[in-house]
Amino acid sequence: MNAAAELPLVHARGLIKRFDDLVAVDGIDFDVQKGEAFGFLGPNGAGKSSTMRMIGCVSPPSGGTLRVLGLDPVKNGADIRAQLGVVPQEDTLDLELTVRENMLIYGRYFGLGRKVVHERAERLLEFVQLEERLDSKVEPLSGGMKRRLTIARSLINEPDILLLDEPTTGLDPQARHVVWDRLHELKHRGATLLLTTHYMDEAEQLCDRLVVMDKGKIAAEGSPVELIRRYSTREVVELRFAAERPPDDLAARIDGLARRVETLSGRLLLYTDDGDRTAERVHELGVQAQSTLVRRSTLEDVFLHLTGRTLVDE
Amino acid sequence: MTTIALPRGAALFERNARAHRSHFLIIFSGFFEPLFYLLSMGVGLGHFVGKVPGPNGELISYASFIAPALLATAAMNGAIYDSSSVFWKMKYMKLYDSVLSTPLGPIDVAVGETSWALFRGLLYAIAFLTTVSVLGHVHSAWAVLALPAALLVGFAFAGMGIAGATFMRTWQDFEFLNLVQLPMFLFSATFYPLSVYPGWLQVVVRCTPLYNAISLIRGLMLGVVGWYQLVNVLYLLLFGAIGVRIAERRVGKLLLR
Ligand SMILES: Nc1ncnc2c1ncn2[C@@H]1O[C@H](COP(=O)(O)OP(=O)(O)O)[C@@H](O)[C@H]1O
Ligand SMILES: [Mg+2]
């Protein structure tokens, strides 16, 4: 392996994005290696899209260092963009063109020859299972199909890095699974993926490594398993209550049954290494919960621990 | 800079050509409008007006007098019509957001859209010029140059029109455009010679882009060509180039933030 192959494809130090007075990205550090699926997990407004847009060279950084493919986005924006595939948060498909034409014309923006573009369009539309809608306009496609078309379009230039900003937000569960399946396939082929999401299951499924983002800052970094091990317990007991707030004295009564207790609206989370055992002891205390659930810890719990808030607004 | 920009902007031209394949009616309307003006005003009204003095004082038919002005106006309208589509593409379709995530930059967007508007203008001009020559209103071999001249007029207004479209906030703002376009059409020595105005007003009219466009094309079609046409050409080149530059700046400022 030569030295160049070990350089991170994306390298950020103290990266900042400001919009007038608002600091959207507040000095973040991260590196993305070749072949990695790297995620930004965080709630709305965390600064994920702002970060992606800076990496995509369509938004100049307000401070710090950013290198993409070893180049400076401010000076070499066009050269970098030539090697990127971009799936923006909002679909920007060309509504005046057909599915196939969307692919062809987008390829032409990259200066690719007609023959190459035709061949790739065919192959990629098959890859995202749109081969039967080739000559359809974009408007009547379902949300999931549009997303898949956007993904196919982003691959037309055979990019070195694929940027996916909330690839499945707004899709129904079935459509999400189709998209995940395609992204898994890309991962297996060795693609480098950068994705943002506020779905913890999406982050767990797709990311080799991720950063938890909140209010423009990175709160933690690691693989999903590492993060859960570091910031949560193995299991969680969820006590659900009909009332908005659990009984006041409850927290005191169950104190000592778990390593940590979080109170949310209508539910109590008990962090413990042995969920069944803890649930049993809660029961022995005679706590009247509407329902009790024992589950594995997730990234949602990591986020809750780090920020005191939930990922998706309740 | 433009040497790289031209081939890249060409992809956007190709995109527009594909998108318009099913909208031929719009292209035709750009041809029929000046033709209807020519027939109603030039032939109809011209019957009562009789002969009018041309640029060098020689008497010519009224239709021959207004035909070049109608060509210039058609080139202007075509270019401005296209630039309003830029507003839609930018604000609602988010077309340039996707274009700018490829190697293309704001200058390529400005150049690509301008060249498309030019092409549309060229189609109008060819059709109209052919028609008026068949009707006998072309009086000189110089008229061949009216085609590139119409292209230049398209360039002048396309650049500025696209720049203007980036300032529009809603469709209602386009009313302001009408407020500029219509008086310019009516008062830029389109339907009567400049000499009917008092001296100070003549100076004002001479400064408008449409007057320069009409002066250039009228000179060519009537075969009265002099250094003044060179001034017209420079004016239109500069006007269009400033427009393209403003359009580039605005696209960058609005979308790359
Ligand atoms: N173009 C913009 N102009 C002004 N503020 C912006 C702009 N884009 C994003 N912001 C603000 O920056 C913050 C981070 O936004 P964003 O990066 O979109 O977060 P996320 O993608 O994580 O939801 C938000 O407060 C948002 O309102
Ligand atoms: Mg976002």
Image (tube, helix red, strand yellow):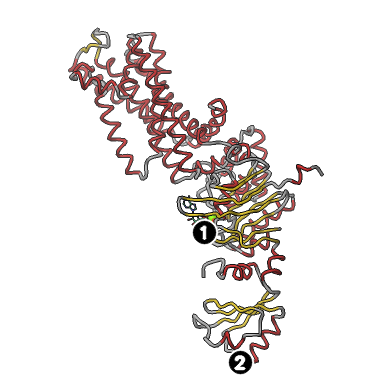
Q: Is residue A300 above or below residue B205?
A: below
In the drawing, does residue A19 fall left or right of residue A207?
A: left
Type of residue at label 1?
Answer: Gly
**Residue pointed to by mark 1:** A45
Q: Is residue B253 above or below residue B160?
A: below
Callout 1: SS: loop
- Picture coordinates of residue A54 (x, y %)? 57, 47
Camera-side residue of A210 and B115: A210
> Which residue extends farthest right?
A1
Q: Is mark 1 within 8 Å of ligand 1?
A: yes
* Quarter the N terminus of chain A occupies: top right
For disc 2, the chain is: A
Marks 2 and 1, the one that precedes in the sequence: 1
For disc 1, the chain is: A
Callout 2: SS: loop
Type of residue at label 2?
Answer: Gly
Residue drawn 57% across the image and 37% down it: A105
Residue drawn 72% across the image and 48% down it: A34
Q: Is mark 2 within 8 Å of ligand 1?
A: no
Residue drawn 39% across the image and 21% down it: B150
**Residue pointed to by mark 2:** A286
User: Tag 1: Cα neighbours inside 10 Å, few (<14), some, or many (≥20)?
Assistant: some
Residue drawn 36% across the image and 45% down it: B170
User: Tag 2: Cα neighbours inside 10 Å, few (<14), some, or many (≥20)?
Assistant: few
Q: Is residue A267 above or below residue A72?
A: below
Q: Is residue B52 above or below residue B187?
A: above
In the drawing, does residue B230 fall left or right of residue A96?
A: left
- Picture coordinates of residue A22 (x, y %)? 47, 54
How many marks are shown on the rendered structure?
A: 2
Camera-side residue of A135 and A37: A37
Alpha carbons under labels 2 and 1: distance apart: 41 Å
